[in-house]
């Protein structure tokens, strides 16, 4: 009898311990990727009531959830291809930051079994299956009082297209989709129904950070953001010697830019424009079409411009430059230069600003050589990683970056520098000339 009691108590203790254990994102390894994984999806719910210990949602029983409130906004986070099997490095941060920003249902869509494989095509084929599972669960949430208007899907790489497929199933009535560098391979030639598209939700915002390799180049959203032109992100490795980071750094930058917007250390201001070159030439920095609002900001709060962007009709492309590390913000200035040389001068500008306490910042404009003609105004965009409140001195260096040819002087009739982050600040300065090195 004593033995029987001990056995029953032991079973109860083990069961109780299992119930207390928090469900976690599936952690796999390169061995799993080599052998391949069968698709399994688990939905992990976090709320402000259970911010650190997830609740695994039961696919066919919404009412069984202890924490899910179907009358609240629900955010789905969907990862992409996992060739090594490990959980995404950004997973912990996005959970914490999203719950800090708003009182929501946060559902992490874990399809690591199905995304972990060395065969990328297999992961691509699983995308529509994941979308179908999500659709089935959302249907039950709708029956239990949820609204499509309050559904928000954040998809990374392949996850962006999964979000698009879910949105298509509801004829674009989902509230919002954010695509973080949507995958390009296997999707770049697909029609709208075969990938993420601006019609998949009421508002679709997309960050393109690796358009020349792993990301999708063309616009996909209501507004498409292209940091640093959409490729070669500052701070990312430039050579193969950096290993795996060389391949994934640009692609992942979209995620870290989005996370930065949640931290609110600074707003990353963007500038709607047809091309990155036009943006660098200062042609699109006034945002006149967006008055009385300011230029759109990147990330979580981009939907503040939703109604205005939708009213403009066609999808909007927006460009901006960043620094190489968090919080990634740049302090942008527009240089307005009038020259009076008799002959055309063409070269690169380096700008240095100094405040009254002697602090100095320097910026080199390398996007494309500028052309200076007699009595012509030239506008050039430049940016600094920090901001100086009271500038006492502005100096320029002009260079062709060639070792041959005669020295000349670029004569400046007038120069003004306007802060784009603080438009009320204007710095006029007249200089006799700038040496041509």
Image: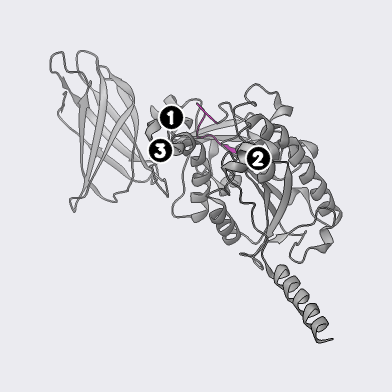
Residue 291 makes an appearance in the image: yes
Residue placed most toward the observer, 80 or 3: 3
Q: Residue at x 27, y 25 (%)?
A: 348
**Disc 3 element:** loop
**CA separation, marks 3 and 1?**
22 Å
Residue assigned mark 3: 236
* Label placed on residue 115: 2
Left or right position of 35 against 275: right
Q: Image quadrant for the N terminus?
A: bottom right
Q: Is residue 235 magenta?
A: no
- N-terminal of the pair, mark 3 or mark 1, is 3
**CA separation, marks 1 and 2?**
37 Å
Residue assigned mark 1: 279
- Magenta part of the protein: which range? 204-214
- N-terminal of the pair, mark 2 or mark 3, is 2
Q: Residue at x 65, y 58 (%)?
A: 24
Residue 154: x and y in percent read 63, 45
């Amino acid at each position: 009898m004593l033995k029987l009691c001990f056995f029953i108590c032991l079973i109860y203790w083990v069961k109780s311990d299992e119930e207390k254990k928090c469900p976690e994102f599936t952690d796999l390894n390169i061995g799993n990727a080599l052998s391949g994984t069968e698709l399994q999806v688990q939905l992990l719910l976090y709320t402000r009531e259970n911010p650190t210990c997830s609740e695994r949602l039961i696919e066919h029983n919404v009412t069984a959830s202890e924490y899910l409130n179907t009358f609240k906004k629900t955010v789905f986070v969907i990862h992409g291809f996992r060739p090594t099997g490990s959980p995404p490095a950004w997973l912990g941060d996005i959970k914490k930051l999203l719950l800090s920003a708003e009182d929501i249902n946060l559902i992490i869509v874990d399809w690591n079994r199905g995304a972990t494989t060395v065969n990328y095509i297999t992961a691509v084929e699983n995308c529509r299956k994941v979308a179908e599972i999500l659709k089935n669960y959302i249907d039950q949430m709708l029956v239990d009082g949820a609204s499509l208007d309050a559904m928000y899907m954040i998809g990374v790489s392949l996850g962006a297209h999964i979000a698009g497929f879910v949105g298509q199933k509801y004829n674009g009535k989902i509230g919002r989709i954010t695509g973080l560098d949507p995958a390009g391979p296997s999707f770049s030639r697909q029609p709208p129904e075969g990938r993420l598209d601006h019609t998949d939700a009421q508002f679709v915002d997309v960050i393109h950070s690796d358009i020349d390799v792993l990301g999708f180049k063309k616009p996909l959203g209501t507004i498409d953001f292209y940091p640093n032109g959409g490729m070669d992100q500052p701070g990312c490795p430039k050579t193969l010697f950096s290993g795996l980071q060389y391949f994934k750094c640009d692609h992942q930058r979209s995620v870290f830019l989005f996370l930065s917007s949640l931290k609110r250390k600074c707003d990353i201001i963007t500038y709607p424009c047809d091309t990155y070159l036009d943006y660098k030439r200062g042609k699109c920095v006034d945002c006149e079409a967006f008055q009385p609002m300011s230029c759109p900001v990147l990330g979580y709060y981009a939907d503040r411009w939703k109604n205005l962007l939708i009213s403009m009709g066609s999808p909007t492309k927006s460009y901006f430059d960043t620094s190489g590390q968090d919080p990634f913000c740049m302090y942008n200035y527009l240089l307005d230069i009038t020259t009076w040389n008799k002959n055309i001068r063409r070269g690169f500008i380096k700008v240095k600003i100094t405040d009254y306490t002697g602090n100095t910042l320097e910026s080199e404009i390398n996007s494309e050589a500028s052309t200076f003609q007699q009595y012509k105004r030239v506008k050039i965009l430049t940016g600094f990683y920090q901001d100086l409140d009271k500038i006492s001195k502005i100096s320029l260096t002009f260079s062709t970056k060639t070792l041959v040819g005669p020295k000349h002087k670029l004569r400046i009739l007038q120069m003004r520098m306007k802060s784009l982050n603080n438009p009320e600040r204007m710095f006029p300065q007249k200089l006799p000339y700038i040496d041509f090195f």
